[in-house]
Amino acid sequence: MEQIKLDVPLIGILRGIDGGFFREVMATSFAAGLTALEITMNTENAAEIVRSCRARVPAGKLLGIGTVRNRDEAEIAIAAGAMFLVTPNTDIRVIEYGAKRNIPVIAGAFTPTEIYRAWAAGATMIKVFPCSVAGPAYLREIRGPFDHIPLLAVGGVTRENLGEYFRAGAAGVGVGSALFGAHALREKKPKEIGENVGRFVEAVTTASTARPEHCAG
C-alpha cells in the first residue's frame, strides 16, 4: 500500500490536559515553531478538545490524536477532526482505516516484525516505542534493513539526547513534558511553555540536519 507523506521532525505530545489550557498551549506552541501537536485519546474529552480547536489550527500546522489503540478510537478521532493519528501499538485495522480516509497514521511498533508489518499495511511513519528501553543504538540497528522506513523515536527523548536519535537515523521525535517543560505545564505558564518549545524546535532543526551514522545490514 502506498504511504501518505508526512514530514514532521518533532511532534509535541500532551496527555491529561484540560481543554481550556490545551488551547493556550496549542497557540503558544505553534507560534513558537512547533509544526505538529497531538493530544492523547486517554485524555478526558480528547475528541471534544480537538473538535473545538480544529478551526484554530494555523495553515501549515497539524493537530492530531495519539494513543489511538483500536479501530473504534480511530473512528472517533477522525470524526473529531484529527489531522493525523498516532498509535502505541500495531493495529492493522487502524492503519487501513486512516489510509482509506487519507489520514496519516504513525503506527507504534518495536520489534523488526512489527515495524515491517505496520509499514507494509500503509503506516505513514513508524513510532518506535518505547525508545527509552533500547536507546539510539537500537534505532541505528533497525535502520540497517529498514532504511526506507521513516522512524519516529518516542519515549525518553530530551533536548540533551535528541541529537543521538537523529544521528542514529530517526526521521523525527515525539516528545511530551520534556518539550513543554513539566513545571510550566503543571503551573500553567504559557509564556514559559513557548520559550521551552522554541528552544526545543531550534535544537531539533540543528540535530535533524546531522548525517545519520552507519547502520548495520
Image (cartoon, grey):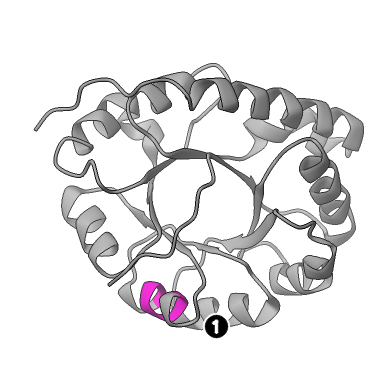
- Please report the residue visible at 70 percent of the width from the left and 67 percent of the height from the top: 46
Percent x, y of residue 80: 69, 78
Q: Is residue 6 left or right of residue 34?
A: left
Kindly tell me whether residue 189 is visible in this rendering. no
43 magenta-colored: no
Question: Left or right: where does residue 1 sit relative to residue 74?
Answer: left
Residue in the image at 62% along x and 62% along y: 64
Q: Is residue 117 left or right of residue 13?
A: left
- Which residue is under mark 1? 75
Residue 11 place in picture, x, y as percent = 59, 45
Asked if residue 64 is positioned above or below residue 210 in the image, the reply reads: below
Q: Quadrant of the N terminus?
A: bottom left
Whether 15 is drawn above or below 117: the answer is above
Q: Amino acid at mark 1?
A: Glu
Q: Quadrant of residue 210?
A: top left
| Crowdedness near tag 1: few (<14), some (14–19) or many (≥20) residues, C-alpha within 10 Å | some
Q: Nearer the viewer, residue 161 or 2?
A: 2
The answer to whether residue 160 is left or right of residue 111 is: right
Name the one closer to the observer, 35 or 21. Answer: 35
In the structure shown, which secondary structural element does the residue marked by tag 1 occupy?
Answer: helix
Chief secondary structure of the magenta portion: helix
**For the magenta stretch, what is the residue range?**
94-98
At 19% from the left edge and 31% from the top edge, which residue is drawn? 141
